[in-house]
Image (cartoon, helix red, strand yellow):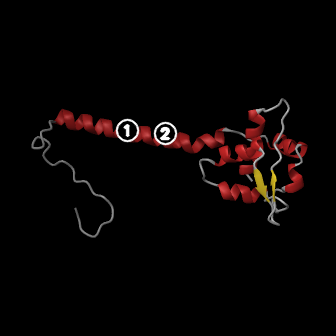
Amino acid sequence: MCRGRTSVHYEPIAAPHRAGLNKRKVKHMNKRTTSFIVTALAAAACGLLAPAAYAVDADAALALARQNNCLKCHAIDKDKDGPAYKKVAEKYKGKATAEARLIEHITSGEKAKFPDGHEEEHKIVKTNPPKDEAQIKNLVQWILSQ
């Protein structure tokens, strides 16, 4: 191993027979390592592509937001009494719990803080049919996509 390097460097096994390994075991280890790397890369690619697989229906999300008067307190790109949806998307960008947190916020009636300091219960988003998780999820995904 060279000094001054910050990366890890592994020396190849020069004499596998001295390490108690025969050629077949070394070849098998190389196949297992390659198989593991390919599997890990495939899993990572699926994880990165999975969010793109869910297509947001922007028209349906905007219609649901209008139905529930969300746009009275929120706008897409500017703050009103509530934060702009772009600001919400920035806040939760890259966070694994973003979707669950926003679903909880819009379906539980928890307290929302206003710019003047007072708090009110956030209006619970109603869907038709009632408590339609797909519509709620679509709305949250639309907000996060801003």
Q: Secondary structure at mark 1?
A: helix
Residue 69 in the image: above or below residue 81: above
Number of other residues with Cα within 10 Å of mark 2, as a class: few under 14, some 14 to 19, many 20 or more: few
Report the residue at 88% width, 44% height from top. 68
Instruction: Pinpoint residue 34: horizontal percent, then vertical percent.
Output: 35, 39
Q: Determine which residue is flagged by label 1.
A: 36
Q: Horizontally, is 68 left or right of 25 in the view? A: right
In which quarter of the view is residue 73 placed?
bottom right
Q: Secondary structure at mark 2?
A: helix
Residue 76 in the image: above or below residue 21: below
User: How many numbered markers are drawn?
Assistant: 2
Instruction: Pinpoint residue 119: horizontal percent, then vertical percent.
Output: 80, 58
Report the residue at 75% width, 58% height from top. 86
Q: Residue furthest left?
A: 18
Mark 1 and mark 2 lie on one chain; the one further toward the N terminus is 1
Report the residue at 14% width, 36% height from top. 22
Q: Horizontally, is 126 left or right of 17 in the view? A: right
Amino acid type at image mark 1: Phe
Instruction: Pinpoint residue 62: horizontal percent, then vertical percent.
Output: 85, 45
Residue 75 in the image: above or below residue 28: below
Nearest the viewer among 135 and 34 is: 135
Residue 141 seen from this side: no
Q: Indicate which disc residue 101 carries.
A: none
Nearest the viewer among 65 and 24 is: 65
Residue 97 seen from this side: yes
Q: Determine which residue is flagged by label 2.
A: 43
Give the alpha-carbon distance from disc 1 to disc 2, as whole Å: 10 Å
In which quarter of the view is residue 1 placed?
bottom left
